[in-house]
Image (tube, helix red, strand yellow):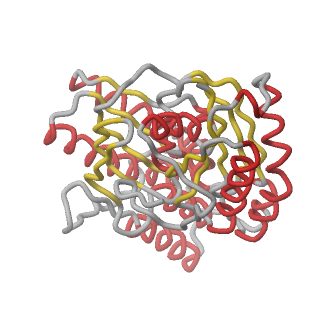
Amino acid sequence: MKILGIESSCDETAAAVVEDGRKVLSNVIATSLEEHKLYGGVVPEIASRRHAESISGVVKEALAQASCTVRDIDAVAVTYAPGLIGSLLVGVNFAKGLALSSDLPLVPVHHLRGHIASNYITSDIEPPFLCLVVSGGHSHIVSVKSYTDFEVIGRTRDDAAGEALDKAGRTMGLAYPGGVSIDKLSPEGDENAFKFPVPKVSTSPYDYSFSGLKTVVINIVHNAAQKGEDINTADLAASFQNAVVGCLLTNLEKAAVDFGFNKIVIAGGVSANSKLRSRAQEMCDSHGWSLNIPELKYCGDNAAMIASQGYFEYLGGVRADESLNAYATMPLDDVQY
């Protein structure tokens, strides 16, 4: 079964064809990242316009690379939530038009479920497992009970880890995206040079908070500027990254122990972070747990992960019609169509 996936939740316009949920036949991405770098972050209006300009060509290229035509496709899967609403609407409306005109089933896919599915196209892992979904907009610990049954165990109560990394990087004067720049610079620094507090969240022992860590970086940089002092940016980057990764893995480890998981999965854009990947492997090795993390090319937003999850949603009977809408926010474990 071949699924055409379409992803447009942020600044990547993507399309892919995936067979039986795991075999990637094509994966095409057009990004407007370089344009957003001029502004230090994603500008929603620019992202929406670039999606509208690119989506038709990206879908055509995905079909061509898979040696397919629309007649070879069994269903169209599309990201419909969460994300930038203007960007989502471009993908949703294109997918609806294509499905309707081609008489194909339309399968709505939650963006974070797609990130989790990125592991299905890079390994043979099957649920159940415990997954850390960590990106620019989300930080969740999720019990994946089946391909379509999810329970959120922990989540951030303010900033997401990726957002904190990006904003801290900007405060340090690093290039956008700040999280990537911090990861590249950190090996040159001392991760113990700056001390960061360990955030405590009263809602749940598995919940996160990153706003305080971000504020510490802002205060360090501003205080140094006021005193005319220089900061070793590599040390600060390494120390901040170490603090964020420590928070992520401390709660993930506690959840795995408390709920009895021995299969650990990490997904989302921040799963490309080298420190997170290496320390997660150390953690799992110490417990005798298995660890799955997507290949780097599937960590960020892409359509192969949407097509993969779309396959399993399709098998689960999920369908949408021409009334499908896009949503800027929606819980991972309580989706609505």
Q: Residue 71 at what x, y percent from top left?
A: 75, 30
- In the image, 75 versus 116, the foreground residue is 75
Give the farthest residue toward the front: 103
Quadrant into which the N terminus falls: top right
**Residue 228: which quarter of the image?**
bottom right
Q: Residue furthest bottom?
A: 226
| Residue at position x 54%, y 77% in the image | 227
Q: How many marks?
A: 0
Name the side, left or right, on which 337 lies relative to 281: right
Relative depth, front residue between 315 and 201: 315
> For the point 32% across and 59% down, which residue is it?
208
- Across and down, in percent, residue 229 comes to 57, 69
**Where is residue 240 shown, x and y percent of the image?**
45, 54
For the point 53% across and 28% down, the residue is 21
User: In the rendered view, does 256 fall on the left or right side of 271?
Assistant: left
Residue 64, compared with residue 96, is above or below; it is above
Q: State the image coordinates of residue 33 (x, y, percent, origin top left).
A: 75, 54
Asked if 263 appears above or below 200 in the picture, the reply is above
Q: Would you place residue 283 above or below residue 179 in this image? A: above
